[in-house]
């Protein structure tokens, strides 16, 4: 996977959520993690990459393809990716199974039986086979997030974007979800995620970028960034989050 | 503890009031034979009310849906027109609307069906209220659901169809059922253009016999027979579309 951005900027009102970001990651990076303080621009950058927001300035190229601007083309862009949010965002009126089947049938154009079979296969792999008929309100936070992850990757997206996938979960549930994400990494799924789980970023990410105030402060391999940070901002941040 | 006390007080107060009312009504000296010749008229009036209400109920859902769509479609001018319409209809007496609708508007276009005009005016009136209920229901669906729908690649129309409307439906059911019950009772105002509906028949029976309560008490039973099933149906649908647990 190659991810390149040039001068990528997104403003909300007068706030520059993403402020002139240049990224250049090549094929060797399968898993890319954004870390840094809350409000630093991680979520916005993910949404820009995933086609959920359009930049005010700058460009994005993924695998050499430029991200489009028009809504119809952006929808096609989003269709090829998978997105997972911090707050699950399952559809509460649909069962776990239907949550996964809906995009396969309505967006990806699968036949209903094929979609059901695929949903069952993924959910079984995620250890959730007994929960297919349940609505989200009947599932724990960790279970909901696993179903949401199943929904995001059932169509085998080129790129899986995870926006702080475990921030709303307690430690045990965090582990359930991170185990799955790691398994997906090992299976070769290309992933871009924002996270506060430093242990996970260090262990699973091929490259890590530290964002603060909408800018990339430092980026590099996980080992380099965690073991020998070059900037004061990253050193201070790591010292703070690693203390507890 | 205070909850138990409160519910006990409320129960006693309601029971006492209700029993007193029943006793007062039951102990009145009735002359049922006086309105005996009018039972047939009352029954036909009841059917007229049933028909005009059922027709207006369906049409008002359509009017309400169109007004909601006009306000949410994202174009300023149509949204403003819908807004003005809703405010105007809700802020003026139905009685005047019926009179204008029949004697001025319908007359101008040469339409002379009292029943038809009554049905349409009622639908336009009730549709304005329904559109506010529908709009509230749709706007109550959290932004995260829209975001999620976009993230999986749904078009806006698909997001409405598969994500937003099914959830909004459940939320607008109770208020819509209330509006439908109002619609049934509001149809009694069609007497001003001489639609021979239920209340008008009672008025005539009373005018001819001076047996006021004998003429009007059947309205209690008759209107309950129309509004209670709406209430029951709404509750059943709420159960069916329940997804919280």
Image: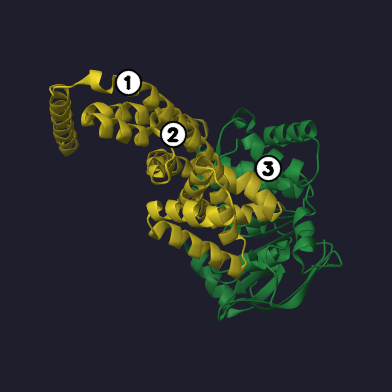
Select label 3 or label 2 by which is in front: 2
Q: List the single residue furthest toward the front.
A: B208
C-alpha separation, residue under disc 3 versus residue under disc 2: 53 Å
Q: In the structure shown, which secondary structural element does the residue marked by tag 3 occupy?
A: helix
Question: What residue is pinned by disc 1?
Answer: B37
A157 vs B62, left or right, is right
Which one is in front, B23 or B113?
Answer: B113
The Cα–Cα distance between marks 2 and 1, rounded to whole angstroms, is 20 Å
Residue B54 pos. (x, y %) = 50, 35
Q: Which mark is residue B144?
A: none
**What's the colour of chain B in the image?**
yellow
Q: Is residue A170 left or right of residue B78?
A: left
Mark 1, Cα crowd under 10 Å, few <14 / some 14-19 / many 20+, is few
Characterize the local packing of mark 2: few (<14), some (14-19) or many (20 or more) Cα atoms within 10 angstroms: many
Find residue B49 and name its label: 2
x then y, percent, for residue B19: 15, 26
- Nearest to the eye among marks 1 and 3: give it: 1
Q: Is residue B95 above or below residue B17?
A: below
Same-chain status of marks 3 and 2 = no
B20 or B151, nearer to the observer? B20
């Amino acid at each position: 996977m190659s991810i390149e951005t040039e001068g990528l900027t997104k403003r909300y009102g007068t706030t520059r959520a993403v402020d002139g970001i240049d990224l250049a990651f090549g094929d060797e990076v399968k898993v890319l993690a954004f870390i840094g303080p809350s409000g630093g621009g991680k979520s916005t950058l993910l949404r820009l990459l995933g086609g959920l927001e359009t930049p005010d300035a700058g460009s994005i190229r993924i695998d050499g393809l430029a991200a489009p601007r028009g809504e119809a083309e952006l929808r096609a862009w989003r269709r090829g990716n998978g997105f997972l949010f911090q707050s699950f965002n399952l559809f509460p009126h649909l069962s776990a199974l239907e949550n996964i089947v809906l995009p396969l049938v309505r967006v990806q154009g699968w036949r209903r039986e094929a979609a059901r079979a695929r949903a069952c296969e993924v959910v079984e792999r995620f250890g959730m086979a007994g929960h297919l008929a349940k609505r989200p309100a009947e599932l724990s936070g960790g279970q909901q997030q696993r179903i949401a992850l199943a929904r995001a990757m059932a169509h085998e997206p080129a790129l899986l974007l995870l926006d702080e996938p475990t921030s709303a979960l307690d430690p045990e549930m965090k582990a359930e979800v991170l185990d799955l994400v790691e398994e997906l990494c090992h299976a070769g799924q290309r992933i871009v995620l924002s996270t506060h789980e430093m242990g996970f970023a260090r262990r699973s990410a091929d490259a890590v970028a530290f964002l603060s105030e909408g800018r990339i402060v430092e980026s590099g391999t996980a080992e380099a960034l965690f073991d020998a940070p070059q900037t004061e901002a990253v050193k201070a941040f790591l010292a703070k989050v690693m203390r507890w | 503890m205070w909850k138990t006390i409160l519910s006990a007080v409320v129960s006693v107060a309601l029971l006492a009031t209700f029993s007193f009312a029943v006793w007062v009504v039951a102990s009145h000296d009735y002359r049922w034979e006086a309105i005996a010749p009018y039972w047939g008229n009352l029954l036909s009036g009841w059917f007229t009310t049933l028909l005009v209400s059922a027709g207006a109920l369906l049409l008002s859902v359509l009017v309400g849906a169109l007004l909601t769509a006009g306000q949410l479609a994202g174009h300023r001018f149509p949204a403003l027109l819908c807004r003005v319409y809703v405010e105007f209809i809700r802020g003026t007496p139905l009685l005047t609307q019926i009179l204008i609708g029949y004697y001025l508007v319908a007359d101008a276009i040469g339409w002379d069906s009292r029943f038809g005009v009554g049905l349409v005016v009622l639908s336009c009136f009730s549709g304005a209220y329904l559109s506010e209920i529908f709009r509230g229901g749709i706007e109550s669906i959290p932004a995260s659901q829209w975001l999620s729908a976009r993230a999986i690649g749904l078009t806006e129309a698909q997001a409405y169809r598969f994500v937003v409307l099914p959830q909004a439906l459940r939320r607008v059911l109770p208020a819509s059922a209330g509006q439908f019950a109002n619609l049934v009772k509001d149809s009694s105002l069609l007497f001003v253009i001489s639609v021979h509906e239920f209340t008008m028949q009672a008025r005539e029976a009373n005018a001819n016999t001076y047996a006021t309560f004998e003429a009007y008490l059947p309205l209690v039973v008759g209107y309950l027979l129309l509004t209670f099933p709406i209430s029951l149906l709404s509750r059943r649908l709420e159960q069916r579309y329940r997804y919280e647990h």
